[in-house]
Amino acid sequence: MHDEDLKAVSVGFTGEVDLVMSAYRAGLFPMGLGDDGGPPMGWWAPTVRGVLLPGGLRVSRSLRRSMRDFTFTVDQSFPAVVAGCADTSREGSWITEGFARMYDDLHAAGWAHSVEVRDADGALVGGLFGISFGAVFVGESMFHAATDASKAALVHLSDLLDERCGDRWMVDVQWSTEHLESLGVSELTGLEYLDRLHRAEGAPDSEAFFS
């Protein structure tokens, strides 16, 4: 990702659920412009978008072995997953208290969801969370406290989407990285992304695959 690909198309904050969801449906996502995700708020639309598409996920043998040690739940510990992702000791931390409150509101409204990864004792050791609508899942962040736990969360999410949405789904990871590319994330131009977004948005409500 190059600097010229990072485009904040609007600056300003609203935490109202309907307005936030309208922005997501239009292909925008929020992230603070200040240090560690602080204000002012930017609404971003990268000219190149990172996405995970059906059949694209690369799962190594070692990751498959690691997954045998984990169990998975969905929406059972949403605040804890957000807190794990917001840990300020992590590099690139950007989830402020204001963001956490906004995601709690989106979760209460049925739009934000978490995948939890647990060890043999049931303790939370990783996970991810994001926003879902249609067959779209906008991945906001993931964390791990055990080796491969965040990757395992992504595999579980992909499996859920395969089961409920067939080949129509898209996971929007926003900006690709070398790490995400190693897992099978690819890049779309802005226009390609919007076309895929609108097709996936028209699928049955993705809330169903979290029931």
Image (spheres, rainbow, N blue to C red):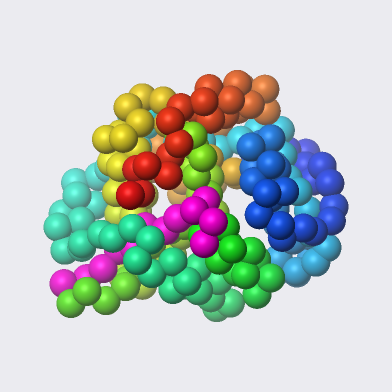
Of residues 99 and 155, the one drawn nearer to the viewer in this rendering: 99
Q: With 118 as the anchor, is 53 left or right in this view?
A: right
Locate residue 148, reporting x and y percent.
31, 60
Decide: is 172 above or below 88.
Answer: above
Locate residue 154, reporting x and y percent.
36, 49
Q: Residue at x 42, y 58 (%)?
A: 114
Of residues 190 and 162, the one drawn nearer to the viewer in this rendering: 162
Q: In this figure, what is the number of numbered marks?
A: 0
When asked about the image quadrant of residue 174, the answer is top right
Does the rendering let one see residue 206? yes
Locate residue 82, reporting x and y percent.
50, 68
Q: With 88 as the anchor, is 155 left or right in this view?
A: left
Q: Residue at x 46, y 27 (%)?
A: 203
When asked about the image quadrant of residue 128, the answer is bottom left
Decide: is 126 above or below 11.
Answer: below
Q: With 14 as the anchor, is 64 left or right in this view?
A: left
Q: Residue at x 80, y 66 (%)?
A: 39
Does the rendering let one see residue 148? no
Q: Judge whether residue 23 is colored magenta.
A: no
When asked about the image quadrant of residue 53, the answer is top left
Decide: is 192 above or below 51.
Answer: above
Locate residue 184, reporting x and y percent.
40, 37
Q: Which residues are magenta?
A: 108-120
Of residues 94 and 204, the one drawn nearer to the viewer in this rendering: 204
Q: Residue at x 50, y 45 (%)?
A: 132
Quadrant where the N terminus is found in the figure: top right
